[in-house]
Image: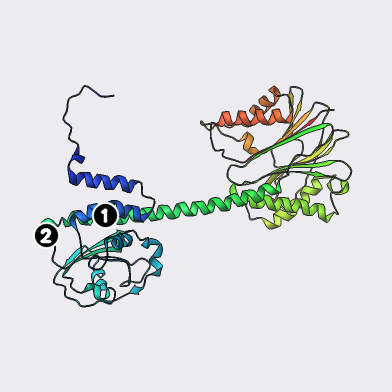
Amino acid sequence: MPTDVTYRREILTEQPDVAIVVDALRKASNAVQPSDVIDAFGQVMRRWSQPELFVTLSTRGLPEGRFRVTRTIDSRSMSSEQRREKRLQDTWRMRESFAVHDSGLLADIISVPEPQILTGLDLATDPALGEAIAGICSCVAIPHYEAGNALNWAMSFFVNEPARDAYPIDQIILISSLIGKASGAAAALRDVRELNHQLESHLNEVARVQRSLLPKSVPHIPGYAIDAFYQPSLHAGGDYYDFIPLNDGRWALLVADVSGHGPGAATVMAMLHAVLHAYAHEIGGASSEGFCSPERVMGFVNRRLCASLSAGTFVTAIMGVLDPSTGDLIYVTMGHPPARHKRGSTIFAMGDASNVPIAIVPDPSITCARAQLDPGDTVVLYTDGIIEAFSPHREMFGTHRLDEVLEQCTGEPSCVIQSVTERVRSFAQRLNQEDDQTLVVIQRNR
């Protein structure tokens, strides 16, 4: 809102010289390619300097005294369109294709890493420039510094000596260096964007492979309603769940959480999937004898992963074997948050079978426990991304809030998942979650 304070205002862009510079800065601020920067500042530089021969060179990555000529623009032999094409050439990507030189006038210039003006030149040819140097009388050479080192140079060659009073060398040095810096930044930004795009593609592929290891759908078990929710914090994560039908009609259920996040955790998750299904193969299929004892399965998984994973990487898991005909659930917890057992409005923590996480010790003592699912009961398996979601004030969601949600819910799997995930999102107030989140909900209907 305008104020009633009185003052005088002078719009500096009403001055033609200032307007040209500001226009160049505006254009350069939108640069996505190095050539955009050069194009933006071209008009500024051409006001002061219209050399017959313009040369850029780079010493980056080369031994002292060696250089590559990355751009040569000869206004005496090139059309305006050819000159523009040369100016906008992406020499950052082409640098390695240019020949390396170590002698001649340019080698002499770069031996002194300071801005300089050369006069009295009279050369017929040059090792790097060839006959383009013929007729040239003077040169203004400006180094572009990186970390204090002159890694790039801009050199303007003239057939006459530049008039010092009409040639603001201090401004030319500053703007030339600005162009070099801004062009390099645009090149780096472009490279980062391209690398990010490649990384995004790789991560999407990791996520696709990981999701292919999860169940395509939840099982249909007469008398039970089952649903699952899986949401990695990044493209891929370390959470895992599975349902394995056993030969005698029972079902093995698993929810696991690999330490860490991202592709590394996803890799371990794939290993867990392979080991678990290798166990079924080793015992001749998902036989009741092999899977009736969850502690036996977890012992096998622990031995395999303990021998394969690096120190500091571990897996928490809860595995159960459900007998649908009786509602009997025998389960084991490997350092994992206790499942919740909802009966009416009462919530029980299934924490009677807590053991050390997988891949901590080679041969731990593993104990299991039992729970009875009566008609109307619901069991909720989850990973710590649910209860360890943080509010903006760094308060943890916790099991008490999870239990509050379950108390108010019908217990139907769809209701549980919707209620819990909405409450967690509302509590965290974040678009991006900090940890992977998984829920597996089983309700006995009859």
Given residues 363 and 334, the one toward you in this image is 334
In contact (CB < 8 Å): disc 1 and disc 2? no
Mark 2 falls on what kind of element? helix
State the residue at coordinates (76%, 50%): 276
The residue identified by callout 1 is 42
- Residue 214 picture location, percent across and down: 71, 46
Tell me the quarter of the picture where residue 7 sits: top left
Q: Amino acid at mark 1?
A: Gly
Q: Amino acid at mark 2?
A: Arg
Tell me the quarter of the picture where residue 78 sits: bottom left
Quarter of the figure that contains the N terminus: top left
Residue 164's disc is: 2
- Residue 352 picture location, percent across and down: 77, 36
Q: Is residue 120 left or right of residue 309?
A: left
Mark 1 falls on what kind of element? helix
Tell me the quarter of the picture where residue 38 sits: bottom left
